């Protein structure tokens, strides 16, 4: 086992230890078929919990999609993003962007990998969901054979609130929903609404 794989396993163990994360697969089950896992976004650790909740055999072919402006700012983050998780790093600034994000993600899928994406496009510090960016639609349309699996992450934003370096002891849960795919001719607004509803359906009921 290489150093990167050991580091990944150690980070998974740490994430599970501080969050006690419990994964529930609803209308779905872990599968080796190629998938795009899409989730609500509250913390920079979101992708790690999803990655840690997958069976070890699936982790090695599942790559997070993340913002290059955050993960390339120092050597440690760069090492974790590029070497440990083989992240697909996206330049979120349209003004400076040199590569098409959808083409970057499609290239990873074409290479046989699965992806973890956050269609809100940024961390949501409130409740509920922000409107989805259109990238997930273009990705689904360009890769109609790939399954898109919604994942609702509960509580991680409270465990590691923005600006905090000390985790709050709360349990986290992940709910994996049924897979969906882009349907031929499906309009952008219809697909985005369907994907967003599939994700919201996994959220716990408000008190």
Image (cartoon, rainbow, N blue to C red):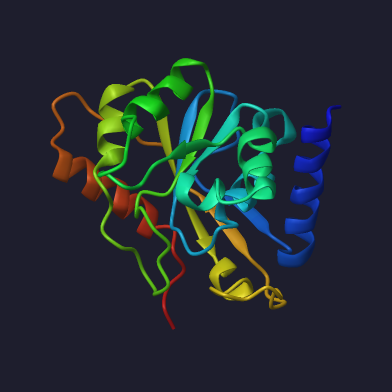
- What is the quadrant of residue 78 in the picture? top right
Answer whether residue 197 is visible to the viewer in this image.
yes
180 over 158 or under it: above or below: above
Residue 194 % position (x, y): 25, 46
Residue that protrudes farthest toward the top in the picture:
111
Q: How many marks?
A: 0
Residue that protrudes farthest toward the bottom in the picture:
207
Residue 124 % position (x, y): 40, 66
Of residue 172 and residue 2, the one placed in the foreground of this image is 2
Residue 115 % position (x, y): 50, 34
| Residue at image point 31% right, 42% down | 96
21 over 30 or under it: above or below: below
Q: Is residue 77 left or right of residue 71?
A: right
| Residue at image point 83% right, 33% down | 3
Rendered-image quadrant of the C terminus: bottom left
- What is the quadrant of residue 190 in the picture? top left
Of residue 70 and residue 57, the one placed in the foreground of this image is 70
| Residue at image point 53% right, 63% down | 43
Residue 69 % position (x, y): 46, 50
| Residue at image point 86% right, 27% down | 1
- What is the quadrant of residue 117 in the picture? top left
Q: Is residue 97 left or right of residue 162?
A: left
90 over 167 or under it: above or below: above
Answer whether residue 181 is visible to the viewer in this image.
no
């Amino acid at each position: 086992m290489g150093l990167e794989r050991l580091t990944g396993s150690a980070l998974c163990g740490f994430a599970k230890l501080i969050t006690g994360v419990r994964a529930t697969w609803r209308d779905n089950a872990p599968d080796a078929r190629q998938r795009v896992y899409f989730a609500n976004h509250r913390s920079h650790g979101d992708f790690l919990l999803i990655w840690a909740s997958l069976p070890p055999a699936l982790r090695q072919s599942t790559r997070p999609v993340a913002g290059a402006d955050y993960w390339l700012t120092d050597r440690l983050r760069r090492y974790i993003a590029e070497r440990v998780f083989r992240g697909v790093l996206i330049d979120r600034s349209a003004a400076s962007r040199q590569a098409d994000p959808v083409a970057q993600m499609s290239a990873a899928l074409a290479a046989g990998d699965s992806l973890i994406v956050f269609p809100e496009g940024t961390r949501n510090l409130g409740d509920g969901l922000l409107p989805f960016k259109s990238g997930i639609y273009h990705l689904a349309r360009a890769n109609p054979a790939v399954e898109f699996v919604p994942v609702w992450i509960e509580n991680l934003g409270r465990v590691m609130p923005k600006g905090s370096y000390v985790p709050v002891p709360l349990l986290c849960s992940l709910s994996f929903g049924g897979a969906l795919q882009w349907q031929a001719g499906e309009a952008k607004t219809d697909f985005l609404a369907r994907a967003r509803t599939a994700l919201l359906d996994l959220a716990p009921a408000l008190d």
